[in-house]
Image (cartoon, rainbow, N blue to C red):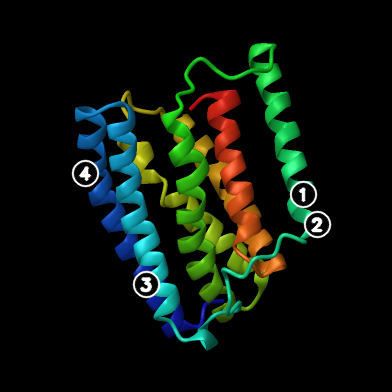
Amino acid sequence: MLHQRAGRQLLSQYGYFFVLWFVIQVFINVPIINLTSGWTEELLTDAVKIVIWLGIGFFMIFHTQKDQFIINRPFHVNLNFKPLYITLFAIVAYMLATAFIQRHSIGIVATFKPTLLLQDFLIVGICEETVFRGYLLNRLAKIVDSEQTALVIQAILFALIHLPRYLTTYPALSFLTIMGQLVTVTLLGYLFGWLFLKSRSLWPGIIVHSVWDLLIVLLIGS
């Protein structure tokens, strides 16, 4: 289980971040979405994401003593990690199959907009992986009894951080839709965490995360 003092500190940090992101989603992102559109909306929401997520992620990583991390160099590039390519093949096959089952064809969905490429392919993956794998899982794996426990805890926390967006979406999402999204994101969070711990690098998770989000908006529709 969590070592008490370090565990409480880490969960408190997560709690503060959750509240901060909820406030930003309600009072900044929602007004941006309602009052702007196109590239203006995209650039503003992306700027908010970068400032909050990358800003806090970098600050926490570079202001934490290295002996508190399980992986001292999370931004080390490791592209020779074979499970990365197996995972990419699997998610591409899964997305193509899902698109075909849902629409009986494979192609770019009508709801796709070029602006989505910036956020879903270039921004979200690196921002979220920096905070949740580069910092949170990196510290968590050092203070829990097993790797599996760390992976499960961070995956659940990763899913919950999406609640501010789900709860402020208009029209409102149904309870079953939100629960389904939480389960999916928990599984993805586990996968991204596993890639990080096994490769000892953030980049496999960033790549898989970005490709997943890109294929969602390209082939499935958000």
Residue 192 against residue 150 in the figure, above or below: above
SS for tag 4? helix
Question: Residue 196 at x, y = what percent?
Answer: 64, 63
Residue bearing mark 3? 59
Q: CA distance from mark 1 to mark 4?
A: 37 Å
Q: CA distance from mark 4 to mark 2?
A: 41 Å
Q: Nearer the viewer, mark 4 or mark 2?
A: 2
SS for tag 2? helix
Q: CA distance from mark 1 to mark 3?
A: 31 Å
Q: Residues within 10 Å of mark 2 (few under 14, many from 20)?
A: few
Residue bearing mark 4? 28
Residue bearing mark 2? 82
Q: Amino acid at mark 1?
A: Tyr
Q: CA distance from mark 2 to mark 1?
A: 6 Å
Q: Amino acid at mark 3?
A: Phe
The N terminus: image quadrant = bottom right
Regarding residue 27, the answer to whether it shows in the image is: yes
Labelled pair 4, 2 in contact (Cβ < 8 Å):
no
SS for tag 3? helix
